[in-house]
Structures are given as C-alpha cells and as structure tokens.
Image (spheres, rainbow, N blue to C red):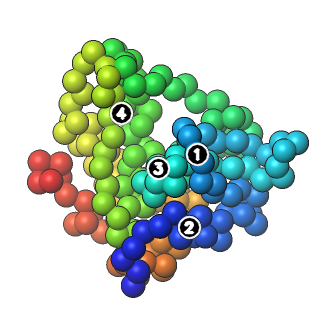
Amino acid sequence: MSTTHHYDQLIAIFDGCFVDDFQTRLIKGDDEPIYLPADETSPWNRVVFAHGYYASGLHEISHWCIAGEARRKLVDFGYWYCPDGRDAQTQSQFESVEVKPQALEWLFCVAAGFPFNVSCDNLEGDCEPDRIAFQRKVHAQVMTYLEQGIPLRPARFIDALTNYYGTPALTAAQFPWPEDL
C-alpha cells in the first residue's frame, strides 16, 4: 500500500484509465486549471491541473467525469465560472454547480487515502460561505452515489485508485457527517 501521493502517480492512474477509450490525458499545469479538447496543437484531450497539486488533479478529474460528450469538446467544458470574490447570490450559484464534482472528488480522495477538504472557493468574496451547509450538500450527493451507483467513468477511476493505493472498497461509513469533522 502506497501512502505517498505524488502527481506523477495520479497522471499514471488517470492516463491508464482513459487515454485509450477517451483520448484524454491528465497534465500538470503551471498556472490555473483548464480543460482543453484535442486541437491542432495536441491529438489528446487534456485535463490540466494546477501546479502539480494532487488535490487540484482530483478536483479537475471530477469535473471531467461530470462533463458529457458534447461538453468534452469545449474548452473548460463550456462551463460558467466566476472567480473568487463572489457576492452571496453568485456564491450560491457556484455551490450549486460544485456539489456533484466535489462529491466525486471526495469519493476519489477516500479511494486514494488522501484528505478531502470541501472548497467554497470564495476567500475574497463579500459574503462568508456556510462551509458546513455546503459540505452537507456534498455529503448528501456522496450518499446518493453510494446508494444509487457511481457513474461509469468515476467508478473506473475509483477502482484504479483503490487498486493502486490498496484502500478498501468505498462505504458510507468512510464519509463522516460534516458536524463530525
């Protein structure tokens, strides 16, 4: 069982799962994360994560796992994103689109034996996000995935993570209620 977490491991695990079937690679970036579909500069679709941070890689993979086929043909999946500094209404919109990706990220973290931290991503905003309320929404989505089934791409990635890191199969008991953290 490996207890270290290095971005090279994450790249190898992701690429091993998705290069052949989805022509998609995980790439260590030097700046902000972005998704780039194949184009004249690369035959590969690229999930680019920030600065080699393992947590950033898991988060960006979660967005890729959510994106459908049409979205995977668009830069950054064509998603709306409003950077840090959001007001209360914009923060609420941000959190509503982040529940599923962060639920997958939490599943990935547990599968890899890596700590998960929910991200409200609004340090410079004019409102204080309710981190516990948001994590409860993410927790509810994790429970839904565990009860109703994890979609195929994230399930494949979870299997690869558990195999690589020697972690046990996912169960609800591995995901504490936010007040218990």
Q: Amino acid at mark 2?
A: Asp
- Distance between mark 3 and mark 1 Cα atoms: 12 Å
Quarter of the image where one finds residue 96: top left
- Distance between mark 3 and mark 4 Cα atoms: 12 Å
Q: Which residue does the image show at 41% across and 80% down from the upper left?
A: 2
Q: In front here: 151 or 17? A: 17
Quarter of the image where one finds residue 20: bottom right
The answer to whether residue 158 of the structure is visible from this angle is: no
Closer to the chain start, of discs 3 and 2, is 2
- Pair 4/1: label in front: 1
Farthest-out residue, bottom: 1
Closer to the chain start, of discs 3 and 4, is 3
- Pair 1/2: label in front: 1
Disc 2 target residue: 8
Where disc 3 sits, the SS reads helix
Closer to the chain start, of discs 3 and 1, is 1
Q: Which residue does the image show at 51% across and 63% down from the upper left?
A: 7
Q: Amino acid at mark 1?
A: Asp
Disc 4 target residue: 121
